[in-house]
Image: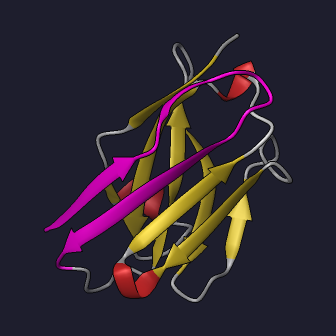
Amino acid sequence: QVQLVESGGGLVQPGGSLNLSCVASGDMFGINAMGWYRQAPGKPRELVAAITAGGSSNYADPVRGRFTVSINYAKYTVYLQMNSLMTEDMALYYCVVGPSRATMGASGVWGQGTQVTVSS
């Protein structure tokens, strides 16, 4: 089994920054991609950003240019640097890991989530 521990969420003013971290542990065999999803109240979960063990990444359109996903695969850790935060970014952010970027949402392992609140 894989366990995920997320950290870094909190309250930030619009325009501010946060850096999320997620450390994975356990049986990481077959885990080749890590990333972040989010869910705002009343909305479905959506991919934010994902990255492979080799460093290939993709982003959702609303966050491209503001968020940066990075990985230290040797430490099974994925990061999400979030800049220029907007109220629309307020959500519960989930760390997700899986076999690939394309499949991890449906068949991967999900963390418990860390809340990001953007408010003045």
The residue drawn where x is 70% and y is 21% is 13
Left or right side of 29 for 115: right
Q: Is residue 14 above or below residue 70?
A: above
Colour convention of the picture: secondary structure
- Looking at the rendered image, the quarter that the C terminus falls into is top right
Residue 105 at x, y = what percent? 46, 55
Residue 111 at x, y = what percent? 31, 48
Left or right side of 15 for 97: left
Residue 78 at x, y = what percent? 48, 66
Q: Is residue 76 above or below residue 83?
A: below
Q: Is residue 76 magenta?
A: no
Tell me where residue 2 sits by quadrant: bottom left
Q: Is residue 8 magenta?
A: yes
Our reading of the magenta stretch's main secondary structure is strand
The residue drawn where x is 47% and y is 36% is 9
Q: Is residue 72 above or below residue 109?
A: below
Left or right side of 35 for 3: left
The residue drawn where x is 51% and y is 50% is 20
Magenta stretch? 1-27
